[in-house]
Image (spheres, rainbow, N blue to C red):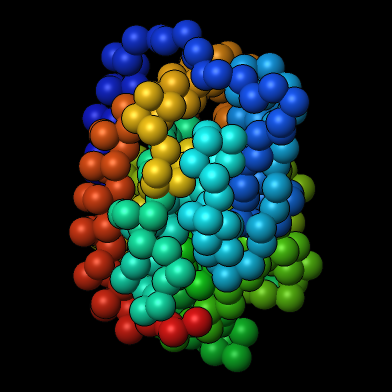
Amino acid sequence: MIDRRHVLASFAALPLASPSVSRAQGQPSRLLVGFPAGGSVDATARRFAEFCRGKLADTVLVEQKVGAGGRIAIAALKDAASDGQTLLVSPSSMFTIYPHAYRKLAYNPVTDVLPIAPLALSTCGFGVGPMVPAAVKTLAQFADWARANPDKAAYASPAAGAMPHFLGNQFERAAGLKLIHAPYRGAAPGMQDLMGGQIASGCFSIGDFLPHLPSGRVRLLGVTDKARSRFAPDVATFEEQGFKGIVGVESYGLFAPARLLAAQVEKLAALARAAVHEPAVVEALAKLGFEPLSLPPADYAARLAAERDYWGPVVKASGFSSDD
C-alpha cells in the first residue's frame, strides 16, 4: 500500500489552479454514484456537486445508479458521451480490487475508465452493534465472543468485493475465526442493520460510524490505517491490537469515460484540486471522516495501479471470486 503520509505531503505541495472548465450551456452535468443515498460515497459526490455548480455547469446532478456493488454506475460511465459532462464519484475498490474478485466485469478498469483526480482518503473501521455485549471493546474480545457465538458471528460490508469485505476477511483469518460475510447495497443499509441489532458487526468507512458513536448504538473496535485516525483517536489500529498487515485506506475519486480529451482531463483535475483546497469542502469531508487528497491524473492512475498489485494476493488468499 502507498504510504498515506507521502500522498498527503504531495497534496500539500501541489499549487492551486483556478478551475477553467468550460461550462455546459443549458445542459446539466451528471455525477454518477453507484451506492445509495445516505452513505459516504453519495455524501462526497453531493458536496463536490455543490462546489461544481456554476463552474462545470449551471446544474450538477448527483444520479444514483445503484447495484452490483457500484459496477452498474461504472458501466453507465463507460457508455456515456465523452464531453466531460458525465462523471463518476467512486471508491477505488471498483478499480483496484474488483478486477481480482470478479471474473466477468462489464468494464476494463484500465482502458474503459479514466482517473481524473482523487478527492479524499478514508480509513476503514470495524465495529459492533447492540447484538454484541457492551463488555466487548477490543478486536480480541470480539474474536472471543464470535467463537462462543458462531451462529451470530457475522459482519456486514457495503459490497461483496469491496475493500471492507477483504479487510473483514483478513481479520477473520488472522484471528482464526469463521465469520459470515453479509454484503449490502451500500453502507447505509448495512449500518441500519448493525445499529438495529440484526447483524453483530460491520466493516465500513470510518465516516459511516462517526455519526452513531456518541449514542453508543455502535462501537468502533479498530481502524485499518497504519496510524490512529484523528477522527477517532481513542480507537487503536488493527496492527496495534496485534493483527499485523491488516491495513486499508481507500481513495474516493473522480472518474470519466476513457475517450475524454487530455485538455478536458486537465481542466477537470484543476476543478477537483480547487475543490479539496476549499475550506468549506475540507470541513464537509472531515464530517465524513475523510482526509482531502489531491494528485495529478497520472499520479492518481499510478496509485490505483499500485493498489491493484497490492490487493491481488489478498483477494486470492480469501478464496473469493464471482461470475456475477
Question: Is residue 119 visible to us here?
Answer: yes
Residue 133 quadrant: bottom right
Residue 280 horizontal side relative to residue 293, left or right? right
Q: Position of residue 148 (x, y in %)?
A: 53, 87
**What residue is at 52 percent from the left and 19 percent from the top?**
21
**What residue is at 58 percent from the left and 41 percent from the top?**
86
Q: Nearer the viewer, residue 174 or 93?
A: 93
**What residue is at 61 percent from the left and 30 percent from the top?**
48
**What residue is at 27 percent from the left and 58 percent from the top?**
308
Residue 131 horizontal side relative to residue 319, left or right? right
Q: Position of residue 295 (x, y in %)?
A: 34, 28
Question: Is residue 208 visible to us here?
Answer: no
Relative to 75, residue 39 above or below = above
Residue 115 quadrant: top left
Residue 175 quadrant: bottom left
Q: Nearer the viewer, residue 290 or 70?
A: 70
The total number of labels drawn is 0
Q: Nearer the viewer, residue 271 or 126?
A: 271
Q: Residue furthest bottom?
A: 151
Relative to 10, residue 311 above or below = below
Q: Position of residue 124 (x, y in %)?
A: 47, 52
Relative to 308, residue 317 above or below = below
Q: Position of residue 20 (x, y in %)?
A: 50, 13
Q: Nearer the viewer, residue 154 or 176?
A: 154
